[in-house]
Amino acid sequence: MIQDRIDSLAEEVVGEVASLWRRIDALAMANVRRVLGAYSAARVSDFHLRGSTGYGYGDAGRKVLETVYADIFGAESALVRPQIVSGTHALALCLFGVLRPGEELITVQGKPYDTLEAVIAGEAGSLADFGVKYTRMEALPDGSPDLKALFRALDRKPRVLLLQRSGGYAWRRGLSVTDLRSVVDLVKGKSPDTVVVVDNCYGEFVEVLEPPAVGADLCAGSLIKNPGGGIAPTGGYVAGRSKLVSLAANRLTAPGLGEAVGATEGFLRLFFQGVFLAPHFVAEALKGAVFAARFFERLGFEVLPRFDEPRSDIVQGIRLGSAAKLLSFCGAVQAMSPVDAHARPEGGALPGYRDQVVMAAGTFV
C-alpha cells in the first residue's frame, strides 16, 4: 500500500516538473553544440585518443584535449590531467600557483568546506603556513556575497578572490554565471590585478557559459564530477588565463616543466568521451534534482533549491532532520544502485573532513 502511494505521488510529480525537464533538454542541446564545436575546431582524431607513457613529452592528444577544454570553457588555455586527484587539489594548484607570502586571499561566502579550509588555513604546508594572509567574509542571509563589504575590502588590493559556484555542503544557494559576472565586474572595476578564482565543482554544463567566459581569471574542478561524464576514472582541470594556468601547471609538476610533462596512457579516450557525454549526463542529474526537490517537498521536507528555482549546480539539498533519516535515505539509494547494492552505508571518517561522512555510492567510478 505504501509503495502504491509513493508510485502515485511520483507520477504526479513527473507531471508537475515536465515543463522544467523540457527546458533542461534545451540546455543540454545547447551545451552539446558547444562541445561539438570545440571538437570540430580542434580537429580531434582517433590518434589523439591514445595517450603517452614516461614523461609524456610531445603528447599530441593531451594538447588537443586541453585545447578542447579551453574552447568549451571560454578560456585562453586549460590544464586537464589524471594527476590532479580532486577538485580540492585543482583549486590548491591555482591558489599556490598565484599567491605569494604576504599577499591576501579573500573568500566571500563564509566558511569554506573542510578540505579547502585545510588548504587555506590548515597546519603544515597550508597557505597560512607560507605566510599568505586570509580574510573570510560572511555571505548575506540569502547566501549571496556581500558586495558592499567586498567593495571596501578591495581597497587593500587583495591578490586573490575565491568564489564557490556550488552551495556545496552549506545550506545556501549557489552562484549563477550572472552572479559571477556581477562579482567579477565589481572586482575588476576597482582592483584589476586581483585574480578571481572560481571553484566550479558541480557547476559545469548547468548553464550555457562557464566562469572564464564572464571574466573569471581561473576556474577549477574534478573530472569525477560533471565534466567527466560519469566515465572519467580520475582527474581534474584548471581553465582560464594562459599565464595563470601555467602557474598552476608549475605547481602540479615543477617550475621549468609545467604543462610540458605528464603521461596520459589509458586516460585520454575516457577524458575525451567523458566531456562529450557530460552535457547529457549533467542534464539527467538536473532532472533528477528537480524531481527530488518537488517529491520531497510534497512529503513535507525542506529543500534547497525548490524544484522551480534557478540552478547553478547539480546539488540538491534536502533537510531530512535526523541522522537516522539520513542513513535510511542513503541506504535506499544504495539498494537501488548497480554496484554494491547489498552494502549498507554508515557514517565514518573521511580524510580532510571534521565530521563523519556517509555516502551512497553504488557507482562504477
Image (cartoon, rainbow, N blue to C red):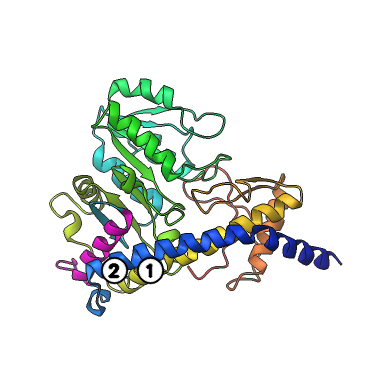
How many numbered discs? 2
Q: Quadrant of the N terminus?
A: bottom right
Disc 1 from disc 2: Cα separation: 9 Å
Residue 71 in the magenta stretch? The answer is: yes
Residue at image position (35%, 62%) is: 34
Residue at 15% across / 66% down in the picture? 57
Q: Contact (CB < 8 A) between labels 1 and 2?
A: yes
**What amino acid type should be assigned to the residue bearing mark 2?**
Tyr
Judging depth in this view, the residue of 347 and 3 nearest the camera is 3
Residue at (34%, 30%) from the top-left corner? 186
Q: Name the magenta segment's main secondary structure.
A: helix
Percent x, y of residue 22: 56, 62
- Judged from the image, the secondary structure of the residue bearing numbered disc 2 is helix
Q: Foreground residue, 295 or 83?
A: 295
Q: 296 left or right of 278?
A: right
Query: Which quadrant holds residue 68?
Result: bottom left
> Which numbered circle lies on residue 39?
2
Mark 2 surroundings: few (<14), some (14-19) or many (≥20) residues within 10 A: many
Q: Which x, y percent locates residue 137? A: 44, 27
Please report the residue visible at 18 percent of the width from the left and 54 percent of the height from the top: 258
Which label's residue is closer to the chain start, 1 or 2?
Answer: 2
Q: Nearer the viewer, residue 93 or 227?
A: 227
Q: Residue furthest bottom?
A: 46
- The label shown at residue 30 is none
Q: Which residue is mark 1?
A: 276
Q: Which residues are magenta?
A: 52-73
| The residue positioned farthest toward the right in the image shown | 1
**Residue closest to the eye, 139 or 175:** 175
> Percent position (x, y) of residue 230?
46, 67
Name the secondary structure under disc 1.
Answer: helix
What's the residue type where badge 1 is placed? Phe
